[in-house]
Amino acid sequence: MKRTHTCGQLQIANVGQEVVLQGWVNKIRKMGALTFVDLRDRYGITQLVLSDAVQNEDIKPEYVIEITGKVIERKSKNANIATGAIEIEVQHLTVINKADLTPFEIKDDITAQEDTRLKYRYLDLRRPVMQNNLITRSKVNNIMRNYFNDHDFIEIETPVFAKSTPEGARDFLVPSRLNENKFYALPQSPQLFKQLFMIAGLDRYFQIVKCFRDEDLRIDRQPEFTQLDLEMSFATQEDVIEMIEGLMAQILKKIKGIDLALPLQRIDYTKAIEMYGSDKPDLRFELVIQTLNEQFKQTEIPFFKTAIDNGDAVRGIFVPKVLTKKDLEALTETAKQNRVNILAFAKWSQNEWSGSIASKLNDAEKATLLKTFAVKAEGTFLFVADKYALASQAMGAIRNHAAKLADLIDEQQFKLLWVVKFPLFEWSEEEERFVAAHHPFTMPTSDCLASFDTDKASAFANAYDIVMNGFEIGGGSQRITDPEIQERMFQAVEMPQDVIERNFGWFIKAYNYGAPYHSGCALGIDRICMLLSHAENIREVIAFPKNSSGVDPMSNAPDFVDAKQLAELNIQHKK
Amino acid sequence: MKRTHTCGQLQIANVGQEVVLQGWVNKIRKMGALTFVDLRDRYGITQLVLSDAVQNEDIKPEYVIEITGKVIERKSKNANIATGAIEIEVQHLTVINKADLTPFEIKDDITAQEDTRLKYRYLDLRRPVMQNNLITRSKVNNIMRNYFNDHDFIEIETPVFAKSTPEGARDFLVPSRLNENKFYALPQSPQLFKQLFMIAGLDRYFQIVKCFRDEDLRIDRQPEFTQLDLEMSFATQEDVIEMIEGLMAQILKKIKGIDLALPLQRIDYTKAIEMYGSDKPDLRFELVIQTLNEQFKQTEIPFFKTAIDNGDAVRGIFVPKVLTKKDLEALTETAKQNRVNILAFAKWSQNEWSGSIASKLNDAEKATLLKTFAVKAEGTFLFVADKYALASQAMGAIRNHAAKLADLIDEQQFKLLWVVKFPLFEWSEEEERFVAAHHPFTMPTSDCLASFDTDKASAFANAYDIVMNGFEIGGGSQRITDPEIQERMFQAVEMPQDVIERNFGWFIKAYNYGAPYHSGCALGIDRICMLLSHAENIREVIAFPKNSSGVDPMSNAPDFVDAKQLAELNIQHKK
């Protein structure tokens, strides 16, 4: 039979109707001669009432059943669920499929290990919280696509089978059976393809696309990830920023009911490091980092003094909480994970000073600290002293961690900003040369166009990242479209002519046939959906993710394959 | 500067406005002191008028330029283009980028070899015909997505890194660096994942997804292809057919302005073979195939007689054209490609009979032929005699070919139908056993549920294909959701228990935890877009396709990779 309604649909207005429902047995309660069953599907839960005469089969949780019955008004209504005003007086019940006892209960709060959840993902995905995560993701994708369609973008698919370019992160490779000893590479992004679309005159391109990077996995990384990818012709940084801001406003409005104030705040990369010790600052809380070399120029604290004498930086924040010993130990651990061994602190409470360096602070320094941080109530000063970049990075991590400990974060808030004016190059200690900070097709800012290849340390890029709640959710740049500037860029990163030719020759040649200026962007959909769903990691918003070993515990992929399969590909294991 | 309009936008109402346009120089014509330039972008072409004073730079075709100027009314209007009523009196011109001479002209009709077009695909994609193909494809995708969103489907992404299942076509493999000597397989379809979504209670799933098959390439095959994939819970064949019919009606209406009459025609597989010699018949023309054993039971034509005596079939069609010698040679070639060596024919024109077997036809046979095929005007009878299946297949191919030669096909027509009631099994000569015709998770029809595993040759499946203009554009089935039926199915295809366990154990186990009945479908988007664009092959609707060797002549993928890359993956070439 066909269901007449879903389990989330019936209201008081339906009372008296004969209905057919199908779904999963969520809960069974016996009360005398009656049995109450919560019937569940993706759309909700409906209460069934079964007399002994009807319930002739022994049903159990997670059985799939079909019932016919009559909608009646409930005596004790349940305001917490959409169908709480009614129940179904069941006339007939059929078991569609039986169910074994599930390895964990089908409900939101469970204590099962993540690998167990992944092994039985089809049961894990029955939990309403997981279904909502996937539904939110589907909605986000649909909002994105309609937004770009409305703005004259064309969605175009780019190849999964592409060419390996050993610059950058590690590629996943696919042996080609038809082309012996050759390999396809799975794309880390459709970067080159989308730039070619602009040369092709397609004007505005977008795609929601899987990308692949063979890196060691971390909490927020999967071997395959999904990005919104876009590129616009006759467009600069400003055009892309405006387009993305409109998109994010729609997403936050439609998914969370939040009105995003536009334009978003912008902050230069240099300033972000200075104020927040991070190029993806979480602005849901203040905790601005200060450089305190001036304030401590006469310090008696030995490691501050050494740092200042060495030209390093003393950097600090003030946390509006008198941190506990446990807090401080945890924060010291965070400092160490960021390669800074000493986290100094001073507590100020009820006009009393205490803490590791309190005894060595003179009155002038104390007054200066209170003034510098505009302290109004009790709290804790935290300090590190190291090279500026290292001290900033560590203090950035401490800042995030301290905000959690001091409970400064409103989890319902969404705080977005742009970080702009990134350095064009970064120094690679390993390779002892400047490398492209973004990628070698990124346009220098107009004020350094003449000098970017001679004064690399002062060169900035027309590149921009969008940050939400302390996560980089996307980024992009204006591209180099002038073959001469491209040539100078390759020279600046000291890429040998034969390497350029082999890896990018086919690509840069395209710019000789008439290219518009163009800019683009990519957004990380896994991360955006994680944040919108308030999920703890991206695996919670992916149907079948890999665990931290790159394994799917459900299907046991990857796995050994037949020798015949390898032989056809002309490869073998290395002995 | 920012463009104020695109090149397809300006109308007579804009006359007098100052505008900024950006685009490609499509054509240059000198006329005395004036130069006329067609400026092109994705949206159209606008005519520019340049006085000698303005045109101080030497512009050439495919230069990218920016102009400011005033919209004026054209004296001789061009009704063929949207902007044909106006032109721009250019005040200022800036060259954004120069262009080398392109290897072929940027226009619809070119004679360049396909590999040249693929090598310079970014130029090939400048041609309006190619841009329109990609725009159509983008629209089709958007129509599909909004349709399924409107019908409560959730779009969910399935993994690209999956497990190899050696049953079926050849998998592409990806060596796992983190799991030594193990491989991911790229999915041939998300079949198992989408069935698990139904067990997870997600109710309605769809996805537009890349799939991968390592087969030898043919005209309509690419190593990666795109399908619309969907699955519905508490749904049978009828529900899926209704859903897909609604979708196809929307696509044809929105893309071609055609009203599709619903419900679509349905034909059983057996009947399709009988009438059209194909399970994907082109119904834009009639040409019904007849079995003529009865009509020729007294024949004097030796190879008809032998066939009939052997229990084989004499099968024929009547083509309403007196075919030429060249036509008949071409059709004989088609017969041979389908493993039938002799194509017999008889022409009937102005009451005269001629052709290879005409002299051996007696009057009764002639009269019967004219009656059997309800012949009203002159034309050609074509015959083959062979085993029924082989004769039917060959005649199916001949039927399609003859329709082209006789000019019976209206290229603007879209003729859709369902082929239903497919055999559940097919006999594998190679493996000397019955194998699953579709896949081993396909539900037998209700009338053979009791006997499908004992009378395999008479077992039919709840499987359905949708056919458009002679191409199978999609197909699906109701799935087996009862573990006992699944068990019998595996036994029927003689799959050993250890193979079942190794390949599908993780999957069939899921059906023990409460599954709804469910059905689904997949549509081939490349093929649908090819047909909607009247393109000759699917490469015309793919931005960067591979050629018939699986190679991208532009980037030269696949290619050799560094030894270091292989070493990290613990693989090496076979010596």
Image (tube, coloured by chain):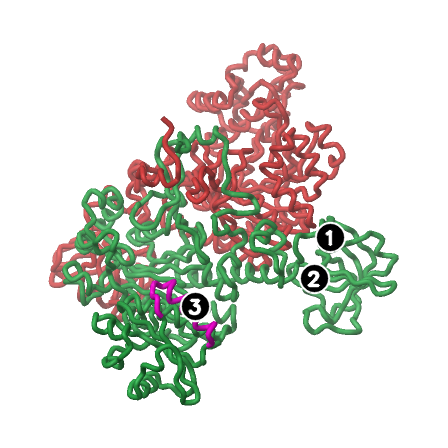
Chain colours: A green, B red
Is residue B7 one of those drawn in magenta?
A: no
Query: In the image, which is nearer the foreground, mark 1 or mark 3?
Result: 1
Tag 1 and tag 3 share a subunit: yes
SS class of the residue under badge 2? loop
Amino acid residing under circle 2: Cys
| Along the line of sight, the residue nearer the viewer: B404 or B473 | B473
Which chain letter goes with mark 3? A
Q: Which residue is found at the position 78% from the left and 71% from the top?
A: A74
Amino acid residing under circle 3: Met
Amino acid residing under circle 1: Tyr
| Along the line of sight, the residue nearer the viewer: B131 or A60 | A60
Is residue B399 among the parts visible in the rendering?
yes
How far is mark 1 from mark 2, CA to CA? 15 Å
Give residue A549's position: percent from left, percent from top: 47, 48
How far is mark 1 from mark 3, CA to CA? 41 Å
The quarter in which the C terminus of chain A is drawn is: top left
Give residue B240's position: percent from left, percent from top: 63, 48
Q: Are marks 1 and 3 in contact (CB under 8 Å)?
A: no
| Along the line of sight, the residue nearer the viewer: A334 or A105 | A334
Q: Where is mark 3, residue-wise?
A: A248
Tag 1 and tag 2 share a subunit: yes
Magenta segment's dominant SS is: helix
Pick whichever of labels 1 and 3 is earlier in the sequence. 1
| Left or right: B184 as drawn, with respect to A63 | left
The numbered dot on residue A63 is 1
| Left or right: B301 as drawn, with respect to A368 | right
| Left or right: B283 as drawn, with respect to A237 | right
| Along the line of sight, the residue nearer the viewer: A417 or A151 | A417
SS class of the residue under badge 3? helix
Q: How many marks?
A: 3
Tag 3 and tag 2 share a subunit: yes
Residue A475 occupies which quadrant of the picture? bottom left
